Amino acid sequence: MTVSHSPQNYQPRPQLLEDRVILITGAAEGMGRALALDAARHGATVILSGFREKALESVYDAITAEGSPEPASLPLDLDKADEQLMLGIATTLGDEFGRLDGLVHTAQYIPFLSRIDDYDAAQWDKVLRINLTAPFLLTQACLPLLRAAEAASVVYQSDRVGRRALAYWGAFAAAMSGLEGLMQTLAEETEGSSRIRVNTIDPGALRTAQRRELYPAEDPNSLPTPESITHAYLYLLGPDSREVTGQAFSAQPTPASTATQ
């Protein structure tokens, strides 16, 4: 695997994503919300996906209030999504948009940090389902729409513990490791034979509600906001990364001794 930091200082031009249709999971909060707003500011028609419909409405309202292209809303509970539901979603998106220029999986679920001895088996299954199986099913269902685009990008939000696992990250580390493998596999299968590129990105430690739940004693003001790193995601979605595939990126410098989400 090639790990690159090239998007960290990327400066997107104003209409970088003009006329592009981009689906973002986890768009109701955190990194997904910040990316949805910024992608829309750069011209994209964003499909907002998340399981809290009211929160999606808030993002929808914020985008339209800024005068960005009108987004679409796609309520989706990844814990309950199966193959048939994902195929139905892809059919609906195909009827409405005809293609997908980008698919970004920012939705993540991390219930707690725990040693393997104590890890609850039901939670293990849920973490793997939301963080690994659901992205696979959604990507698989949307492949025809991605192939219908001139140059499509699939971006999986990963984590450094998926590249070098650390104690107490349990099922999430296993899921992120699997996600890296999924990215590499799909990148190999599509390289040279389609117009799809596939990469992962680790956002690093951010000032989010999820981070506060995992590290309640940490000063959140010591961490960057999701809004401060959206440019790295825009790089992977825009034309400047058109030849880039099969790589594991980091949105921030990643100290080797620190495990974060």
Image: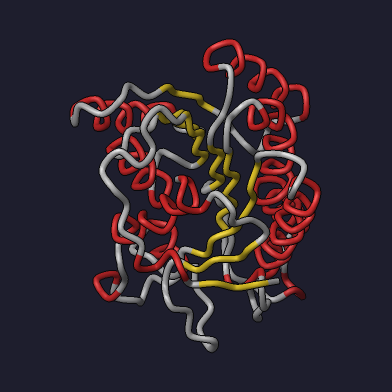
Q: Is 228 drawn above or below residue 24 in the view shown? A: below
For the point 43% across and 54% down, the residue is: 235
Colouring chosen for the image of the structure: secondary structure
> For this view, does 112 lie left or right of residue 69?
right
Q: In this view, does 132 lie above or below 46?
A: below
Residue 144, position as x, y percentages in the image: 71, 26
- Give the farthest residue toward the bottom: 257
Q: Residue drawn 36% across and 54% down?
A: 230
Residue placed most toward the observer, 206 or 252: 252
Q: Which image quadrant is residue 86 in? A: top right
- Rendering coords of residue 30 (x, y %): 38, 51
Q: In terms of depth relative to the viewer, which is nearer, 189 or 83?
A: 189
Coordinates of residue 183 in the picture (x, y in percent): 70, 55
Q: Where on the picture, by quarter, is residue 218? A: bottom left
For residue 220, side relative to residue 21 (left or right): left
183 sits left or right of 258 in the view? right
**Nearer to us in this view, 16 or 217:** 16
Q: Quadrant of the N terminus?
A: bottom right
- Picture layout, residue 19 above or below residue 33: above
